[in-house]
Every structure is written in C-alpha cells, then in structure tokens.
Image: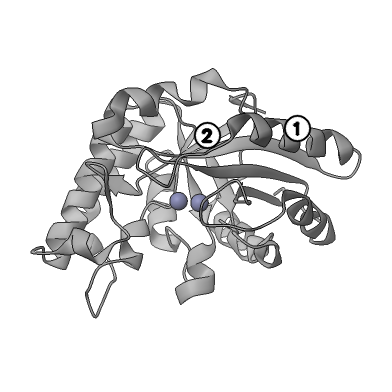
C-alpha cells in the first residue's frame, strides 16, 4: 500500500504557520510517495482561504520543483454546510484542484469547535445533530471527493467523556457511508486523533464498518498544521487498513481517481 499524506495545512490556512516547502522536505524524509496540500476554506468569517491565487501559484511551483522526488498534489479542505449549500457545491469547481476534502467544521454556520455551540445539549444530542448535518451535507452537496474526519465532533464539547456512543449513532453513520459509496466518494483516515488521544478519526471499527458496507475509496491524512507531523503514523494507518482488507489507498489527479 502506498505511503501518502493527503491532508496538509500551511500558512494559507488561518490556523497554521507552516511553510509548504518544509512539508515537502519532511515528506521526502519520511519516504512518502505522494502528498496533497489541503488548506482550509470554510464559509464563516476568519476561515475563508484569503489568497487563492497565491495559494495555487506557490503550490503548483513547488509541485514542479520537486517532481523528481515526490508527487505533490494541490487540493483543498472545504467546510461543507447546508446553510452554505450553493457555495459548498460551487467553490471547488472554479479552481484546478486535484482533490477536495469535505469536512463538517460548522453546522448552520456555527463553529462546532466553540464551547458555546454545545450549550443546552447533552452529548448524545450534540452528536445526533452533528451526524444529521453530515448526512444532509453528503446528500445535497456533491463537490468533494472524501469526507473529512468522520468523528471530529468527539474532540469538542464540555463533556467529561467525549467519546461517541456508536450504539446510538451507528444507523445514521451507516446511512452516511452508503450515500458516500453510492456517489463514488470516500472517507479519510485522519491521523490527528492518534496524536491527540491515540485513535485515528475514524477508528478501526468504523473503518471496518465502511469496508464491510462496500467502501473502498480511502485516503490517509495527518492533518498536519506543522511540518514535524507530516507522515506521522501513516505506517499505522496502512497496517490497520491492510488488516481490514483494503488493497490500496486512493489518490487523485484533477479530481479523478488515479
Ligand atoms: Zn478539518
Ligand atoms: Zn484539516
């Protein structure tokens, strides 16, 4: 299985200072075959990608500079949201991206990383709302290739035990998987969770569930906002995916599967 890192942020994202060339050098050192830059574009204040022209110009120049050492792709991570349905659908079409991650960072254009989002909701209610928003987005928004960090909501909320109760939420997660599979879209193994609490987003059981339902399109991403994390735990993800039965990871060029 090929070693890739398909989720990287740089100083073009509001929450990163990382230099994209440093990411590439780290990826070469880590012997990755391929990487994809996926800076943020969300549809709330402070999270839009500010300078798309410089983003494309700088990253395509780096792709060319390092082409004999590593495959570099240029993508984007879009914050999909039903209150920005049209923009979520149209944004990526305007630019020559190789790959698009669709992620739920906001619900009804409210930032779900903020504690205020969770006011007056139990954890199970908050998670039910999160998965319902995700189901709506994957149903009505088409312009992305893989769904980002399936169980991202587990990081947030004022709950002592932040874990997701999959017994309650499995039916809607299964529906989400089936919609993605029927649309020819995939999911990612997001490794930021391993760094933070020892488990990828999603973890083994949900990856296996996706596979058992017929899901084969899968990418691996560290979600690095700092070059020191590029490629970290990719081997672990490959081990897990191989054990489940996946034969390869998926890569993209100009929005088409390679
Ligand atoms: Zn994200
Ligand atoms: Zn990200």
| Left or right for 199, reference 35 | left
Q: Is residue 48 above or below residue 244?
A: above
| Mark 1 nearby-residue class (10 Å; few <14, some 14–19, many ≥20) | some
Local packing at callout 2 (Cα closer than 10 Å; few below 14, some 14-19, many 20+) is: many
Residue marked by disc 1: 60
**In whole angstroms, how far apart are the C-alphas of marks 1 and 2?**
16 Å
The furthest residue to the left = 120
- The image quadrant of residue 43 is top left
Pinpoint residue 183: horizontal percent, then vertical percent: 39, 25
With 95 as the anchor, is 128 left or right in this view? left
Residue 17: x and y in percent read 63, 58
Ligand 2 within 8 Å, label 1 CB: no
User: Comparing marks 1 and 2, which lies closer to the viewer?
Assistant: 1
Colour scheme shown: one colour
Give the quadrant of the C terminus: top right
Q: Nearer the viewer, residue 69 or 15?
A: 15
| Foreground of the two, 54 or 119 | 54
| Vertical position of residue 10 compared to residue 251: above or below | below
Residue at left 60%, top 46%? 12
| Circle 2 SS class | strand
Which corner quadrant of the image does residue 238 belong to?
A: bottom right
Q: Nearer the viewer, residue 122 or 65?
A: 65
What is the x, y in percent for residue 120? 8, 64
Residue under circle 2?
A: 100
Q: Earlier in the sequence, mark 1 or mark 2?
A: 1
Q: Residue at x 28, y 42 (%)?
A: 134
């Amino acid at each position: 299985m090929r070693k890739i890192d398909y989720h990287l942020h740089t100083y073009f994202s509001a929450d990163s200072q990382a230099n994209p060339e440093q990411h590439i050098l780290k990826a070469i050192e880590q012997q990755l075959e391929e990487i994809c830059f996926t800076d943020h574009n969300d549809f709330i204040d402070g999270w839009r990608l500010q300078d798309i022209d410089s983003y494309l110009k700088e990253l395509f120049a780096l792709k060319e500079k390092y082409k004999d050492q590593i495959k570099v792709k240029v993508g984007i991570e879009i914050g999909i949201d039903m209150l920005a349905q049209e923009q979520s659908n149209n944004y990526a079409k305007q630019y020559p991206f190789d790959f698009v991650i669709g992620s739920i960072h906001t619900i009804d254009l409210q930032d779900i990383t903020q504690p205020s989002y969770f006011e007056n909701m139990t954890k199970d209610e908050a998670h039910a709302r999160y998965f319902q928003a995700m189901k709506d987005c994957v149903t009505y928004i088409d312009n992305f290739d893989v769904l980002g960090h399936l169980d991202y909501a587990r990081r947030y909320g004022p709950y002592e035990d932040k874990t997701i109760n999959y017994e309650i939420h499995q039916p809607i997660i299964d529906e989400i998987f089936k919609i993605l599979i029927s649309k020819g879209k995939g999911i990612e193994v997001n490794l930021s969770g391993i760094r933070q609490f020892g488990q990828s987003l999603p973890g083994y059981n949900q990856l296996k569930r996706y596979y058992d339902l017929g899901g084969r399109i899968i990418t691996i991403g560290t979600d690095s906002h700092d070059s020191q994390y590029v490629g970290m735990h990719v081997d672990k993800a490959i081990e897990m995916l191989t054990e489940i039965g996946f034969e390869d990871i998926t890569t993209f060029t100009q929005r088409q599967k390679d």
